[in-house]
Amino acid sequence: MQPCQICGKNPASVHFTEIVNGKMSELHLCDTCAHDKGIQPSLGKGKFWISDLIAGMVDETVGAESERVGRVQCSGCGLLYSTFRETGRLGCPECYTSFGAQLRPVLRRIHGATRHIGKAPLRDQGRLQQRMEMASLHDELERAVEREDFEKAAELRDRIRTLETTAAPGKGHEG
Amino acid sequence: MTPALKELARRPSRWLDASGPHSEVVLSTRVRLARNVLGAPFTHRAREEQLHQVLHSVVSAARRTGSLRDSVLLRMGDLAGLDRQFLVERHLVSHDLVEGSSTRGLLLGPDETASIMINEEDHLRLQVIHSGFQLAESWRSANHLDDELDGLLDYAFSEELGYLTACPTNAGTGLRCSVLIHLPALVLTKQITKVLQGVTQVGLAVRGFYGEGSEVMGNFFQVSNQTTLGHREKETAENLERVTRQLIEYEEKAREVLLRDARLQIEDKIYRALGTLAYCRSIGSQETLNLSSAVRFGVALELPGLPPLPVLNEILVFSQPAHLQRMLGREIGPTERNVARAEYVRGRLNSNETRADRA
Ligand SMILES: [Zn+2]
Ligand SMILES: [Zn+2]
């Protein structure tokens, strides 16, 4: 009989499998330890090791550099980056800006992307749509230049200029 | 027990009624959106009065929506331990939320289809649960509720990173779509690991729970999207939808193989499971789960004389400890619970209505 992976004493009776990014991990626990961890058969929770996951992900800087990065603090809530590293939880929306440089590679590793596409709150919709249109025009322009279709490129450049001049004032960067 | 909970305890959740498509394979579909409001730190860093303010504004906004106009607010701090456990067993709240004080709560819509966990890891966790395989429908409802709230609350949002959440694994769309799927034939034919590993290749996560000792156990898996940044909500739902259809198809193929090569053994296992459930005098929750999983498999195989799916779904939920004690109206220890569970399950399987459904 397999022993529980947490207490190592009781026989394991709850078997937890998680497959993330094609890698399977198994956890074999006794009833007591499973209960302590909030795992119950039929209740698909298993959230408890997400923070381990993140801790593992962000922990790639080492030594002095790691210590320096760890002391970076959020200007909104005062959270230390080192605390985020331990808990996997950010303190406030502002953290995303304050830890921007550190979070980008983390987000890329979790999601494979660092840019949101999709739904936006209504108040941002108009501006967002304009930006998205602009981004896709820039993409198209790049592709046109690549295939040396300069006529198309000139046309796209004009459309981008028009859009830029009609864009609402106060298009400064917002977090 | 609050009146609202008493009402809840009397009837099964709507999503247990097995009315949704493919209910014999997909038990339920769930869509969740994580949102935070501006003006307070994320839940775990906020002060009690800030959480109170969040709770207040979420509740008053929600009561102005069509979806949750008639919702009830259950504050965790006001609930006894057993009642909190009851909500966990009902799949309405997380283990994290029930540990909270009265600034954390569940805002619950009339038929338990739509609800909001307030001040869980994020300020709002909008959730929609439907019976069977209804991803498009669930996403539509959740999206609609979110739209309704959007005009009334200021969400934390950035153009670059989307909806901002306490854990970066939810940032972007904040969307988690999941299906609770029953795959006994793939487990029995030992194809499950291969199949599920394939599923994870396309950005989905799989969680499974199973017990030891019998093969026809642990056949429920929760499949959900893994990433929330860089994909449109619709793509996320469609990806899971496509993969779930594939899983259903694989499961059906595996069933055909089993029926062809091992019909007698399979039928024997299923009817023995039903026999145990229908005549036992003491039974643990794990065994109940495993045996009803076997019987559910029989229903999927269209074997005669088995109880209908809604009854099996109810047994899954109502045989859990807090539900049993709720039904009895008092707290009892594990040994007594096993006896009460057996009595409940026997009663449920041998009632006239259940028998009438048998061939
Ligand atoms: Zn243990
Ligand atoms: Zn912060």
Image (cartoon, coloured by chain):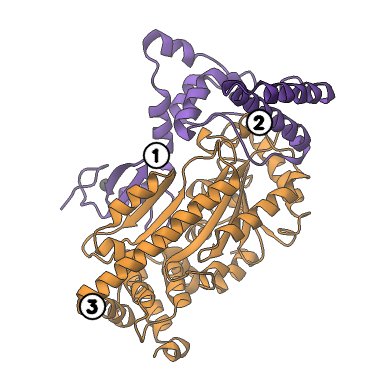
Chain colours: A purple, B orange
In this view, the residue in front, B149 or B119, is: B149
**Label 1 to label 2: alpha-carbon separation:** 38 Å
| Label 3 sits on residue | B263
Q: Is mark 3 within 8 Å of ligand 1?
A: no
| Label 1 sits on residue | A49
* Numbered mark located on residue A136 in the image: 2
- Residue B347 x/y as whole percent: 41, 83
Marks 3 and 1: CB-CB under 8 Å? no
Badge 2: chain ID: A
Question: Helix, strand or loop at disc 2?
Answer: helix
* Numbered mark located on residue B242 in the image: none
Badge 3: chain ID: B
Q: Residues within 10 Å of mark 1 (few under 14, many from 20)?
A: few
Q: Is A98 placed left or right of B239 in the picture?
A: right
Badge 1: chain ID: A
Residue at horizontal 38%, vertical 51%?
B207
Answer above or below: position of A35 versus A109.
Answer: below
Name the quadrant of the C terminus of chain B: bottom left
Residue at horizontal 57%, vertical 24%?
A147
- Residue A44 x/y as whole percent: 43, 54
Image quarter for residue B68?
bottom right
Answer above or below: position of A103 versus B207.
Answer: above
